[in-house]
Image: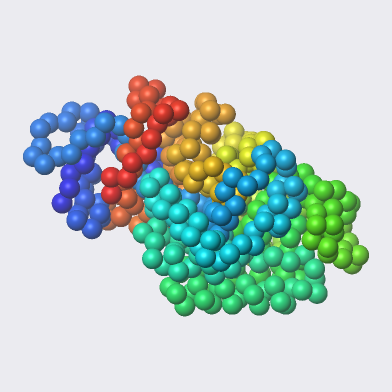
Amino acid sequence: MRKISAHYILTGSGVLLKKGIVTLTDQGVIADITDTKGELNEIAGLEFFSGMITPGFVNAHCHLELSHLYDLFPEKKGLPAFLKSVNELRNSDPAHITDQARKGDAELWQNGVVAVGDVSNTNKTFALKVQSKIAYHTFVEALGFSPGKAEKAFSMASDAFNEARDMGLPVSIVPHSPYSISRELFDKIFTFSAAKDTILSMHNQECSAEDDLYLSGTGEIYHHLTQNLGLDLSAFRPSGCSALESVIGWLPTENNLLLVHNIRTRQKDIDLIGQARSLTKTWFVICPRSNLFIEDRLPDIELFRKNNLQICIGTDGLSSNKKLSVLEEMKTIQTHFPDIPFPEIVTWATRNGAEALSMNKWAGTIEIGKRPGLNLITGMDLQHLRLQPQSKVKRLI
Ligand SMILES: [Zn+2]
């Protein structure tokens, strides 16, 4: 048994304990939580840390498979240019891809992450995920805007799904985004996911050119698909609606759904999503540092709060981020949205992510019986409960 205390303990569900004590079994399972109300007496064997303790972080959106693209792309060039770069540079020596992904996994662990929703287009990260100390949910991402290639795209995704499942990894097949999946491919994902009740994830409203494609069959994404990818879109008929409105009905309503990025999400979009599916089964993943890297813009997080949306935090991949650190994402949120209370941001980084990935039986909150891991955040302004530029995270468990 270990008894651990610090200046503050944040449980992940918004509760703040001043100098509380967490008792853990040798396996890291929480056996007891004591609210000392700030009055900590001498207790034999108690480990006291300077700083704030939180549950282990949950990174709701990452692409370990793109770790080898670290520091290769120019920043703030917009999504279409980013997609072009990924397409041009993602192919590399498989051993190099796996090596860099392994380093990414080690970086996540070092930065206090216990669980990850990770996007895979191939099987290159499966073996390392099996060996990792981190719990992964793998989103095998289907890709294909040509209706004629839906069968092949789905069959490739199915092969990866089966391989991951056979290796014991929690896994689902998901659409990459509205602008990269044909209606035919969406339908295949729908049937498969509805039957298996798997967790869904989709990049959503990352740039305005997604809407140009669906509204009028024009714009930079259209250009990317036809010019960079060489697709024949002559059979594509714009719906005349936004990208989100066009495809939201093509996703099963009962599955958990993680909508990722949401940079352009407005009230009318939230209303639309709320009409199409239950918001209790929908999570809004924000990846602020990636958003600044690619689009130089952040989602309207205050609007999400006003609507009581379930917010999660993701790092995205190293192709659009310098670090795989949930703490750095929280710092960015706090810098740009200084009025959001820190305990609330921590619930996004812990409990909400665990719920979205269906890992909340063991992760996300400091509760008796769970094994969430414990992080110590040091270098905080403890008087105002705020992160500072020099704040760091250290794993205690
Ligand atoms: Zn992504």
Horizontally, residue 341 falls left or right of residue 45, namely right
What residue is drawn where x is 63% and y is 40%? Answer: 293
Horizontally, residue 221 falls left or right of residue 126, namely right
In percent of width and height, residue 289 lies at 57, 39
Closer to us: 30 or 289: 289
Question: Farthest residue in the left direction?
Answer: 44
Horizontally, residue 5 falls left or right of residue 366, namely left
Horizontally, residue 38 falls left or right of residue 227, namely left
Answer above or below: position of 54 versus 131.
above
Answer above or below: position of 227 versus 335.
below
Question: Farthest residue in the top direction?
Answer: 383
What residue is drawn where x is 50% and y is 43%? Answer: 323
Dividing the picture into quadrants, the one containing residue 38 is: top left
Q: What's the colour scheme?
A: rainbow
In percent of width and height, residue 171 lies at 51, 68
Can residue 383 be seen from the camera position used here?
Answer: yes
In percent of width and height, residue 205 lies at 70, 47
